[in-house]
Amino acid sequence: MAVKSAVDKENNMNDDLIIAGKAYHSRLLVGTGKYKDFTETRAAIDASGAQIVTVAIRRTNIGQTAGEPSLLEYLPPEEFTYLPNTAGCYSADDAVRTLRLARELLDGHKLVKLEVLGDPKTLYPNVIETIAAAKTLVKDGFDVMVYTSDDPIIAKQLEDIGCCAVMPLASLIGSGMGILNPWNLQIIIENATIPVLVDAGIGSAADAAVAMELGCQGVLMNTAIAGAQNPILMASAMRKAVQAGRESFLAGRMAKKLYSAAPSSPTTGLIS
Amino acid sequence: MKIMINGKDRHLDGENMSISTLVTTLNLTGKRLAIEKNGEIVPRSQFDATALRDGDTIEIVGAVGGG
């Protein structure tokens, strides 16, 4: 029965990720940057099983665009849920402006990823500007998934503002350093009534599984897949790691003991 | 008429050019994009009705790969 219920959890709607009222069976969200070409982008995203993909909003190339392929042709917005981001924004005003353009670009699409960065060297979030932008965007009707530091107080404030998901970093964007402060993540998860997703810093499949075992509702990554030697194989590994971590979390791990006086094999019937 | 598009000055022939005509002139017909005129978003439904004036600042953006 245990196996059946775990498989059910994986396959049916009982364990969907719910973001802003919409259900997703995949708990892995992926970025679309840093791939060698759009064919590789598409193949990696297919291997990841992701349904939500982040995109950046940038100035269109003027003059040399005729016939140039676009990301949207490879990842049709009808097939994926687009999550436009504010990567590269260092102020609340720039972030809000970018996402209003994204909403126009994507025909009124409301689900967005807010990130306001503090400095170009570390890409550490500026939480003061993030909070200001979140307030404006929520008032303006956006469903805001917000990237932030792993500070539990800030995470709670962003929830109170009305964000639909809070996404603390595991470690710095693009660093691949994994989860640096699992204890803070645990506090954030324990206090939250909205989904908590780890965003940024994941390096390997093990990191993604640990994030899910901590009780995260999902994981968002880009470089961990696009920066792997074999991005498509890594995308597949991440898909499995997120599923495995989720099932492990739901199953409930055994208690840790320094040593066990109860071996797994019978203590009687030994040959003498 | 001189306008700034995506941070660069451009000279356009003729007066009373609409945003729609600008999109065609720039070979962007059919592309999914969003446009700001002087800091205000111009909804796609208003492209025909919105005229450009000398000195306008235009931003044209699209979706690209990102994390």
Image (tube, coloured by chain):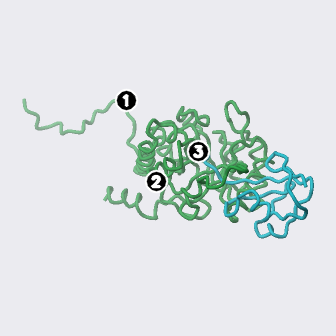
Chain colours: A green, B cyan
Residue receiving disc 1: A258
Q: Residues within 10 Å of mark 2 (few under 14, many from 20)?
A: some
Query: Disc 3 designates what residue?
Result: A33
The amino acid sitting under disc 3 is Gly
How packed mark 1 is, by other alpha carbons closer than 10 Å (few <14, some 14-19, many 20 or more), is few
Q: Which residue is at a point 74% across and 45% down the rendered structure image?
A: A130
Q: Are marks 2 and 1 on the same chain?
A: yes
Q: Nearer the viewer, residue B8 or A138?
A: B8
x, y percentage for residue A271?
7, 32
Give the mark nearest the N terminus, 2 or 3.
Answer: 3
- Whole-angstrom CA distance, mark 2 to mark 3, is 15 Å
Mark closest to the chain's N terminus, 1 or 3: 3
Give, as a three-letter code, the residue at label 2: Asp
Q: Give the image location of residue A68, x and y in percent.
A: 61, 52
**Residue picked out by circle 2:** A46
- The chain carrying label 2 is A
